Image (cartoon, helix red, strand yellow):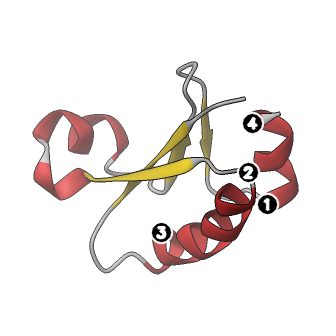
Amino acid sequence: MAEQITLISGPNCHLCDQAKTLLVPLLDAQTITLKELNVKEDAALFERYGLRIPVVVFADGSEKGWPFTGAQIARMIN
């Protein structure tokens, strides 16, 4: 099981807010840490993800872009 999940997000992004709301209870229940990275604070992140946020990046490097469900994320972390 992953110990940390990264959420690539941005400021004033309502989809990112929805993703975080979905992820936090799911990850808390499995004691997984959520690390959030803002595309506006890193030029390389912005170039790669700026038009695709929110994106979840798993410990193994795999990614799941929005839209996603809690069930999809749960399957991917187990």
Q: In front of the other: label 3 or label 4?
A: 4
Mark 4 to mark 1 CA distance (whole Å): 13 Å
Q: Residues within 10 Å of mark 2 (few under 14, many from 20)?
A: some
Pick the front one: 35 or 41: 35
Q: Residues within 10 Å of mark 1 (few under 14, many from 20)?
A: few
- In screen coordinates, is 25 left or right of 35? right
- In screen coordinates, is 14 left or right of 49? right
Contact between labelled residues 1 and 4, with CB atoms less than 8 Å apart = no
Q: Is residue 45 above or below residue 13?
A: above
Q: Is residue 61 above or below residue 64?
A: above
Mark 2 to mark 3 CA distance (whole Å): 21 Å
> What residue is pinned by disc 1?
69
* The disc label shown at residue 77, or none: 4
Contact between labelled residues 4 and 2, with CB atoms less than 8 Å apart = yes
> What residue is pinned by disc 2?
30
Contact between labelled residues 1 and 2, with CB atoms less than 8 Å apart = no
Residue type for callout 3: Cys
